[in-house]
Amino acid sequence: MGAAPVAILAAMDEELAEVRGRAWMGQSLRVDRCRVTVGRLEGVPVIMATTGDGPENAGQGARALLGRFPVGGLIAVGVSGGLSPALEPGRLLAARDILEDGRPAPPPDAAWLERAVQQAGALPATFVSSRTLLCTARSKRDAYAALPDGGVASVDQESAAFARAAADRGIPYLALRSIADPAEENLPLDFNALRDATGAVDRRRVAWRVVRRPALVAPLWRLHRRVDLCAERLRRAVCSLLEGGIP
């Protein structure tokens, strides 16, 4: 990969906040809808960006970013929901394979996957990319039952889009996720009903729902704290991967 920077992508600012906080940041700019920061992390040049949540935003943002900057590799990070039982909040996973609509996405880089498991303590897993948010324990259980092989699995919306964008450019990639909501739990809201025209969750609609239902404050705050935990776990993993250079 030479001296080309590593792109570190997430859907939401909260998912990348801890990584950005650790990095030396040299320049901030916008590329398409992406908030982009150029800098260094563990001595490695990096381009950090958030695309917006949902598969369309992730794909569009990743393609725009990779079309603007020459990069040597891509690390996609974010939170996810557990599909297999007993994945506790904060558990770090690395994609062994990614499925979308039952079909495999381009595979992650084998060397990076091995380093994520050996150095960062990630659990190899199947990532299911879903066009809808799985907000109930039942929907997650049904998605897990549909997997051909069982095993460790989680669900998110963006991993397949990031994988395709990397593959289209011939760029090796790794996908890391940390569990925000275990398989056995319901999310406090049906976030699918609160999305905007781009497919992203509209935070103004969430806030308005909370105003109307104050009982949502406590469970949403717990979810927020879990996202913070996940962001810290992801930071540790990314720093561990970049220490001493890249494969």
Image: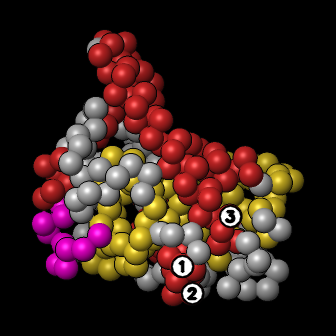
Numbered mark located on residue 239 in the image: 3
- Quarter residue 206 falls in: top left
The CA distance from mark 1 to mark 3 is: 14 Å
Instruction: Give the residues drawn in magenta, as a range.
Output: 143-152
**Which residue is depicted at the point 82% across and 52% down?**
25
* Left or right of residue 142, residue 222 in this image: right
Report the mark closest to the observer, 1 or 2.
1
User: Residue 150 in magenta?
Assistant: yes
Q: Please, what is the three-letter code of the amino acid marked with disc 1?
A: Gln
Query: Going from the N terminus, do you reach mark 2 or mark 3 first?
Result: 2
Q: Please, what is the three-letter code of the amino acid marked with disc 2?
A: Ala
- Quarter residue 73 falls in: bottom right
For mark 2, what is the residue?
A: 111
Query: Going from the N terminus, do you reach mark 1 or mark 3 first?
Result: 1
For the image, the number of numbered tags is 3
Q: Is residue 59 visible?
A: no
Image quadrant where one finds the N terminus = bottom right
Furthest-right residue in view?
26
Question: Measured from the top left, where is residue 117 in percent x and y?
Answer: 50, 76
- Depth check: give the residue in front, 175 or 22: 22
Q: Please, what is the three-letter code of the amino acid marked with disc 3?
A: Cys
- Depth check: give the residue in front, 243 or 188: 243
**Which residue is depicted at the point 43% across and 27% down?**
221
* Left or right of residue 165, residue 6 in this image: right
Crowding at dot 2, Cα within 10 Å, few <14 / some 14-19 / many 20+, comes out as few
Crowding at dot 3, Cα within 10 Å, few <14 / some 14-19 / many 20+, comes out as some
Q: What type of secondary structure mainly makes up the magenta span?
A: loop
* Left or right of residue 147, residue 241 in this image: right
* Left or right of residue 147, residue 127 in this image: right
